Amino acid sequence: MKHSEFVLALFDLDNTLLAGDSDYEWAQFLIDRGVLDRDTHEQKNRLFYEQYQAGTLDIFEFLAFQLAPLAGQPRARLDEWHAAFMRERIEPLINPAAAALVKLHRDAGHTCAIVTATNEFVTAPIARVFGVEHLIATELEQRDGTFSGKPAGTPAFREGKVVRLEQWLASRGGWQAVADSWFYSDSANDLPLLERVHHPIAVDPDERLRGVASTRGWPILALQTKAGAAGGGA
């Protein structure tokens, strides 16, 4: 079956569309509710963030840490928490310039997708707020309808973003059906996917990505001033 060509617009989420990191904000939300111990969690999270910035993060070690609070929680409780999380933590991080960028691609008829290492439970409602139909995020293992605290399949991190995107594209004709493509990201960890698209765009980039973008002549876009501390997600 021949697939029609389409134009693809891909967006990283944390510190790209959001003026902050949704993984970090979710942990802070749980700390505020007494689900996590602040000192213990923040000490570990700081170490993971340093590894993330240095490009040495072990994504499976990080996910074991980050997904543990979801394990065994009733879904109704998690959904109640998430609704409050959106109001308190995420809505203040949505910059009009980022929303306008997504709308620009949607209005042009481009197929839009958020590609993020942050897990699907945290990010699916955020994608809906941006009006992005497709989400390629780290998937979660479930047992008897509850999260196990482990990822399922390939995490959408570094080269894993390319793997997961290509799995998603397989039913749409693969890369050969993509007539044109953009990817917007703030992080050098996303270089594998930035190097794969037609138009790599560095958005408020970290130091390593700014250097690469400057050397290669990639556009550098300023969407927002980043909020406070960031977490280890991408």
Image (cartoon, rainbow, N blue to C red):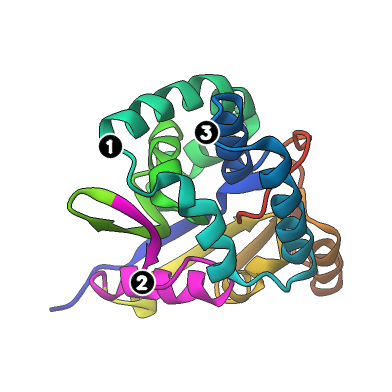
Left or right: 228 as drawn, with respect to 136: right
- The residues bearing labels 3 and 1 have C-alpha atoms spaced at a distance of 15 Å
Magenta stretch in the rendered image: 147-172
Amino acid type assigned to the residue bearing label 1 in the image: Arg
Question: Local crowd at mark 3 within 10 Å, few (<14), some, or many (≥20)?
Answer: few
Left or right: 185 as drawn, with respect to 136: right
Tell me the residue at 83%/61% (across/down): 210
Image: 216 above or below 227:
below
Q: Where is residue 202 in the image (x, y as percent from the top left)?
A: 72, 57
- The residues bearing labels 2 and 1 have C-alpha atoms spaced at a distance of 21 Å
Q: Name the residue under label 2.
A: 153
- Mark toward the viewer: 3 or 1: 3
Q: Which of marks 2 and 1 is nearer the N terminus?
A: 1
Tell me the residue at 48%/26% (across/down): 86
The answer to whether one can see residue 100 in this image is no
**Which of these two is toward me, 39 or 32?**
39
The answer to whether one can see residue 51 in this image is yes
Q: Earlier in the sequence, mark 3 or mark 2?
A: 3
